[in-house]
């Protein structure tokens, strides 16, 4: 049977945050209005958020009713409740519950509404309060915060919202002109259109956001900041303005302001997973991963078992140095998705256990990784480090050698190998390791520092033991350090070690009437005299004292050589 209304089936498939919405929408249109072509834009008012489910439905219908009364159909078409409910029911959605922001956008697109309203309604002691926004359907981040509406009757508050919607919509033609100009790279045209639309209404934030984009295209950062901060002041949830501010404050290295804006961004739409991921990543990138932990915790709680979020949380917790939290999340991550148990995962897991001073567990994690990825140099390095901290020195040496073989130009591998060899008192092996590293083309600066550390340790050992072998070992490594890269530190310690060796040899040569010890003393003092002046550039007082003391030993050494070297 023919009716006065035409029923048009429209199959649409939309997606938000992993949610697939499939619907056969029933679009109702009057044949007379369709023929005239004079209908205005469609605006959708879905169920409002409320602790009282019925109140959210009633408030939405009250706004629709008031808006219909206050407007002409040739200016604005309010999507009827029936259209909304038919689309929701066809998609398996409740017709009485408020939609998530992304689903509201999807529904608006489905019912062909270029704008839609989102909001919250609450019952107050004196009546009703409605807080709402007018949103552009093509981009849910572009919206206008409407004035808070309050009234003793629901219709009174709804009437205020309707008037605010009418006022906010006056900026839309200018916003569309600005949007098109910016999309074509005609930024100055966009500025002109936006400023014209804002004339007399500086708080027209939908077109204001487009003005921000146009200024950004012109690289006018100060103007971007000025307009964005003004928008932010009266609309703290304006995502466009907040994102622009975050970008500029990041470029200006103004971390305090950037973090403040990032916090506002997270609060602007706590249901937007992608937005929160961006905020968390940026907080971590600024070196403030600790501040991202609460956001990450909420994300995981609201989206349990999400592999991408678990991977992000794993990295954030590691950057925040919350190692126990990282370990817990890492275990869950690989349980949910075994493919995430990469060599890098095992290396980081071992590092997390090591940071918690749990060397045995670090060693076990590294061993599991090494068994799975035997040729991975980073994992071998972590495994060797874990074994070293666990006191399993010989095993650590073997694994460190494997790490060096896998990546011959990584100075960290040589540093660890030489450190373990030093702990085993395999000093000849340490020197061989550094020479091997030099031949492999490892960074000479890093190798020089390794040799310097070994020489410094040996010098300290000699100071305590008074054993000439320690000073001779110090000289060997300090000479190697200076050969790899000359430094005042190496030269001073070399001179000091040589002086201590000469002093000890002089005393023992006299007691033992030893020509070899006398010659050792002479050569040591000569070596000290050569290197101390250069070391004095950094240690002037200490070097001067030793250089002053050397001549006091010279006569005795010369006399010993005459007496004992015949």
Image (cartoon, rainbow, N blue to C red):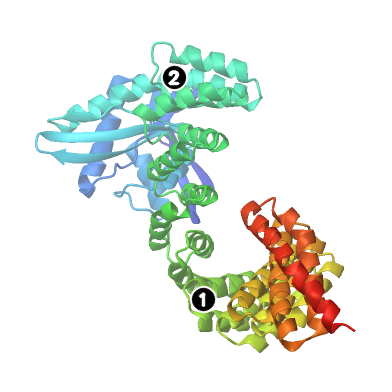
Q: Separation of disc 2 and disc 1 at Cα?
A: 52 Å
Give the residue displayed 47% in from the left and 62% down from the top.
321
- Residue 394 location (% of width, % of height): 67, 88
What residue is disc 1 on? 335
Position of 19 relative to 334 (above/below): above
Which label was assigned to residue 103? none
Q: How many marks?
A: 2
| Residue 376 drawn at (x, y percent) | 72, 74
Residue 135 placement, left or right of 63: right
> For the point 28% across and 23% down, which residue is it?
69
Q: Is residue 333 something one can see in this rendering?
A: yes
- The vertical placement of 86 against 62, above or below, is below
In the displayed structure, 89 sits above or below 484; it is above
Determine the secondary structure under disc 2.
loop
Q: Nearer the viewer, residue 488 or 188?
A: 488
Q: Residues within 10 Å of mark 2 (few under 14, many from 20)?
A: many
Name the foreground residue: 540 vs 174. Answer: 540
- The x and y percentages for residue 483 are 82, 63
Q: Quadrant of the C terminus?
A: bottom right
Secondary structure under badge 1? helix
**How many residues crowd mark 1 within 10 Å: few (<14), some (14–19), many (20+)?**
some
| Residue that numbered label 2 is attached to | 171
């Amino acid at each position: 049977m023919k009716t006065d209304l035409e029923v048009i089936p429209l199959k649409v498939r939309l997606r938000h945050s992993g949610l697939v919405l499939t619907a056969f929408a029933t679009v109702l249109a009057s044949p007379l209005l369709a023929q005239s072509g004079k209908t205005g834009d469609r605006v959708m008012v879905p169920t409002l958020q409320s602790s009282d489910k019925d109140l959210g439905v009633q408030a939405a219908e009250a706004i629709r009713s008031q808006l219909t009364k206050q407007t002409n159909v040739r200016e604005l078409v309010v999507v009827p409740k029936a259209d909304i409910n038919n689309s929701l029911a066809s998609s398996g959605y409740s017709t009485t519950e408020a939609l998530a922001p992304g689903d509201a956008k999807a529904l608006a697109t489905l019912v062909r509404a270029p704008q839609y309203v989102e909001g919250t309604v609450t019952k107050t002691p004196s009546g009703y309060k409605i807080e709402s926004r007018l949103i552009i359907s093509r981009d849910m981040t572009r919206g206008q915060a409407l004035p808070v509406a309050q009234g003793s009757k629901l219709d009174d508050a709804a009437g205020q919202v309707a008037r605010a919607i009418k006022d906010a919509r006056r900026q839309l033609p200018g916003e569309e002109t600005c949007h098109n100009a910016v999309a074509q790279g005609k930024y100055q045209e966009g500025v002109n259109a936006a400023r014209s639309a804002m004339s007399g209404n500086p708080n027209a934030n939908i077109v204001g956001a487009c003005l921000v984009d146009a200024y950004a295209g012109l690289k006018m950062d100060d103007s971007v900041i000025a307009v964005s901060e003004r928008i932010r002041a009266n609309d703290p949830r304006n995502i466009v303005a907040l994102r622009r501010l975050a970008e500029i404050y990041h470029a200006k290295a103004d971390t305090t302001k950037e973090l403040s804006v990032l916090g506002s961004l997270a609060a602007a739409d706590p249901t937007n997973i992608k937005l929160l991921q961006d905020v968390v990543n940026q907080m971590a990138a600024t070196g403030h991963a600790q501040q991202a932990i609460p956001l990450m915790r909420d994300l995981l709680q609201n989206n349990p078992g999400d592999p991408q979020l678990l991977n992000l949380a794993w990295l954030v917790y590691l950057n925040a140095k919350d190692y126990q939290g990282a370990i817990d999340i890492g275990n869950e991550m690989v349980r949910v998705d075994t493919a995430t148990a990469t060599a890098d995962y095992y290396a980081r897991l071992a590092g997390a256990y090591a940071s918690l001073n749990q060397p045995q567990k670090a060693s076990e994690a590294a061993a599991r990784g090494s068994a799975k990825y035997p040729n991975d140099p980073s994992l071998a390095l972590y495994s060797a480090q874990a074994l070293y901290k666990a006191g399993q020195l010989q095993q650590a040496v073997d694994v460190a050698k494997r790490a060096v073989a896998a990546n011959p130009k990584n100075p960290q591998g040589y540093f660890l190998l030489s450190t373990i060899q030093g702990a085993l008192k395999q000093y000849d092996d340490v020197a061989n390791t550094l020479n091997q590293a030099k031949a492999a083309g490892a960074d000479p600066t890093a190798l020089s520092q390794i040799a310097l550390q070994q020489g410094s340790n040996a010098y300290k050992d000699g100071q305590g033991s008074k054993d000439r072998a320690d000073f001779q070992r110090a000289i060997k490594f300090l000479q190697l350090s200076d050969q790899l890269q000359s430094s005042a530190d190496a030269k001073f310690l070399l001179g000091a070690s040589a002086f201590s060796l000469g002093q000890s040899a002089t005393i023992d040569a006299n007691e033992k009437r030893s020509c070899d010890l006398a010659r050792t003393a002479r050569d040591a003092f000569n070596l000290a005299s050569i290197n101390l002046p250069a070391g004095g550039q950094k240690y002037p007082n200490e070097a001067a004292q030793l250089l002053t003391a050397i001549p006091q030993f010279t006569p005795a050494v010369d006399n010993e050589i005459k007496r004992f070297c015949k």
